[in-house]
Image: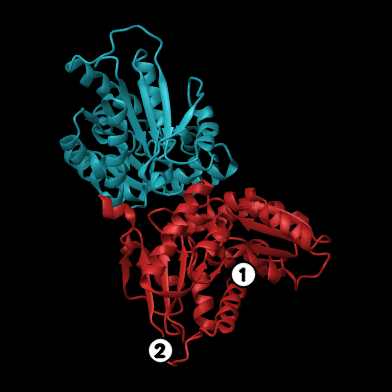
Chain colours: A cyan, B red
Amino acid sequence: VNSLSIGIFDSGLGGLTVMNAVAKLLPHENIIYLGDTANLPYGSKSKEAILHHCKENSLFLQSLGVKLIIIACHTASIASYKQLGNELRVPVINMITPSLALLESVPKENHIAILGTSKTISSGIYQKMISEQFPSCKLTSIACPLFVPIVEEGLACHPIAKVVAQNYLSPLKKEKVDTLLLGCTHYPILKETIQEILPFASNIIDPSYSCAKQAKKTLEERNLLNKKNNKPIYRFFVSDNPERFKSLAKGLLYYPINLVSLANPSLLKKS
Amino acid sequence: VNSLSIGIFDSGLGGLTVMNAVAKLLPHENIIYLGDTANLPYGSKSKEAILHHCKENSLFLQSLGVKLIIIACHTASIASYKQLGNELRVPVINMITPSLALLESVPKENHIAILGTSKTISSGIYQKMISEQFPSCKLTSIACPLFVPIVEEGLACHPIAKVVAQNYLSPLKKEKVDTLLLGCTHYPILKETIQEILPFASNIIDPSYSCAKQAKKTLEERNLLNKKNNKPIYRFFVSDNPERFKSLAKGLLYYPINLVSLANPSLLKKS
C-alpha cells in the first residue's frame, strides 16, 4: 500500500500548483494527476454537476490504485468534500481546511481579501468560516471568474492577464488589504501579476503548501508514507486534449512532463 | 410536420443571437433552444469531444420533434457539420456557409478581419475559404478566447469586457480594417464594445441573419414552413444551471423567457 500513488485532481491546470507543493514536501511519493479538462471550468457549474465530476474523477483515480486523494480545487472541495469523504475507501484532502489553517498565523486585526471563482465566493463558505474563527479580521471577497479561463487558455503571461487582474483588484488598492488568500488553485499561477498590482499586500497566501502538509500528516498518521527512496513516478491524465494540456503544463511544473494520457472518461467511452 | 419546432443549439448563450434572427425572420415558427451549459466552452475542447456533444444535442432536439436543426455555434459547426448532415433525419444548418455568403457583398479589395474562438481560428477553415473565394481581399484572423467566458459570466456590460476587447483588437487599429466578421455567435453580444474600439470598421458582419435566411430557404424548399399564424411557442433547455441561464438570457432576447428546463443530458442521468 505504501508505494501506491497520491491521487490529485482538478478541473485542469490549477491543481498542478498543489502537485508542485506535494512533490517538494514528499519527494519520494508517486503521484497520479488528473485534469478534468473535458469539464472545465467548474466555477460556473451547478453543485450537482461538480459533485458528479468529482465522483467520476475519484473513482478513476481509485481504479488506478491510490492511497490518498487530494481535491486540488476549492470549488470542487466545497461541492464534494463531505460526500467524497464518506464514500471513498481512501482518505480525502480538500483545499478549504488547509486555507483556514494558514490564516491562523495572520495578525488578528488584518484586512483579508479572498479571491475565488464565482461559485466559491457566492457559496459564502470562506466568509462564514473566517468571520467565525477570526472575528476581528476585516474581510473582503472578490470573484475573479476570468482568472481560470486566462490560465487554461495559456494567457497567464499575456498582457491581458494584467488588465483583467487590474480590473478585479484595483478596488483593493484604496482599502490597504494586508493579506490576500488565493482561494482557487489556478490563482498562484497569476501570483506575480497579482503582486505587481497590490505591492502593499504583504502576505499572499497560497494554500497549496499547507495542503501538502496536511497530506503528509494524514499519511504519517496512517503509516502510509512511501518507505522506498526511489525516484518518484509522476503520471498525468486528462479527460480531453492531452497535447494541449502537456504544452501548457510544461511551464508550470518543476520537473519534466513527458506523457499525458487520455483518461477515458465516460464522455469519450460513449461516443 | 410543418408545425414542428426549429431546433437551435449552442454551448450556452451565444446561439440566442441566432434565435433572435430566426424569430424575427420567421415569426410564426416554434423554436426549441438548447444551451449545452454543462459542456461550455466548446472553443478549447478537442474535435472529438465537440462532435460528441453536438451529436447528443441533436439527438435530444430530435427526440422532442424538430423539423430542422441549426448549429448556432461556429466552433461546433466546423467540428460536426458534415457528420450531422449525414446522420440526422432532419436538415441541418451551420454557421460557416451563411458567414461566407455574407462576404459576397463586401468590396473586393477589402481588408477583412475574422474574430473567433481559438478552435475556430486555428482550424484555418475561414482563412482557407476566404482566400479561395475572395482572393483579392486582405485577411487577418484573431482568436479572442476570453470573449465567450465574458459573455457566459454575464460580464458583457462590465468594464472588463472593454479592456479585454481593446487588448485583442488594438492591433487592428493601425491596419484600417474595413470589415469585421464575427465568427462566433457569442460575439454579437459584444458588438457595441467592439464598435467603440474600431469605429472605422464600417462593416461588422453578424452572420445570424444570414443563417436565419438560410433556414427559411431550406424550409421553403422542403415545404416545411409553419402555415398556421399562431403566436409561436419558444422552449428553452440547458444541460446545467437553468436559473443562471435564465437570468443571463433575459437581457439578450427580444421576447420574455419564462421557463428554462434542465435537458436531462447523459451527465446528470448517471449521477
B88 or B267: nearer the viewer? B88
Residue under the image location 23 percent in, 45 percent down = A125
Other residues around mark 1 within 10 Å, as few (<14) / some (14–19) / many (≥20): many
To which chain does the residue with label 2 belong? Answer: B
Picture disc at residue B179: none
The image position of residue A57, as x and y in percent, is: 32, 38
Of residues B25 and B29, the one nearer the viewer is B29
Residue B231 numbered tag:
2
Mark 2 touching mark 1, by CB under 8 A? no
| CA separation in Å, label 2 and label 1 | 26 Å
- Mark 2 or mark 1: which comes first in sequence? 1
**Left or right for B115, reference A205:** right
Residue at image point 58% right, 50% down? B119
- Image quarter where the N terminus of chain B lies is bottom left
Amino acid type, callout 1: Pro
In this view of the protein, can residue A233 be seen by the observer? yes
Residue linked to disc 1: B207
The answer for which chain carries disc 1 is B
Residue B229 left/right relative to B271: right
Return the residue nearer the eye: B97 or A173. B97
Image-based side of B86 in relation to A116, left or right: right
